[in-house]
Amino acid sequence: MTAEILRFALGYAQIALILALALACWRMLLGPRAQDRVLGLDTMYINAMLLFLVIGMGNGNVFFFEGALVIAVLGFVTTVCAAKFLMRGEVIE
């Protein structure tokens, strides 16, 4: 019974994260300002990272956790670079 509940919860979480990822993609593509697009990108990488973690929990595969870590690091760097570009107009000084 517990395994069935866990499988149902992980499936529901995957569907919810895919929906959140699609809505964040919509915000990134159709955002009226650049700040909205950066916020959509930030939300997209967080949702992708969480989706990788949920899939890894369902499969029991360690490589999904490593992929989530890579997505988190690259997403953070991308957000910092985009914010710096919006503030100053250049990334590298």
Image (cartoon, rainbow, N blue to C red):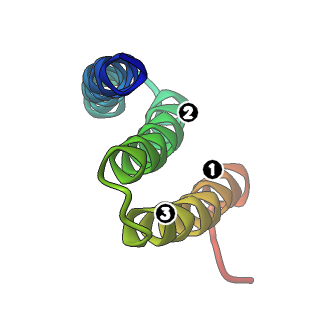
Residue 9 percent across, percent down from the top left: 38, 19
Q: Is residue 14 above or below residue 44?
A: above
Marks 2 and 3 close (CB-CB < 8 Å): no
| Front-lying residue, 43 or 91 | 43
**Amino acid on which disc 3 is placed:** Phe
State the separation of the CA atoms marked 2 and 1: 8 Å
Callout 2: SS: helix
Name which of mark 2 and mark 1 comes first in the sequence: 2
Which residue is drawn at the image coordinates 39% and 63% (left, top)?
64
Q: Which residue is mark 3?
A: 65
Q: Quadrant of residue 30?
A: top left
Residue 9 shown left or right of residue 86 in the figure:
left
Residue 56 percent across, percent down from the top left: 38, 53
Name which of mark 1 and mark 3 comes first in the sequence: 3
Marks 1 and 3 close (CB-CB < 8 Å): no
Q: Which residue is mark 1?
A: 86
Marks 2 and 1 close (CB-CB < 8 Å): yes
| Front-lying residue, 82 or 21 | 21
Which residue is drawn at the image coordinates 30% and 27% (left, top)?
7
Residue 46 shown left or right of residue 5 in the figure:
right
Give neighbour class at mark 1: few <14, some 14-19, many 20+ (Cα, 10 Å): some
| Front-lying residue, 9 or 87 | 9
Give neighbour class at mark 2: few <14, some 14-19, many 20+ (Cα, 10 Å): some
Residue 36 shown left or right of residue 13 in the figure:
right
Q: Is residue 39 above or below residue 91?
A: above
| Front-lying residue, 74 or 32 | 74
Of the numbered discs in the image, which one, if any, rests on residue 44?
none
Between tags 2 and 3, which lies in front? 3
Q: Quadrant of the N terminus?
A: top left
Q: Quadrant of the C terminus?
A: bottom right
Q: Which residue is mark 2?
A: 35
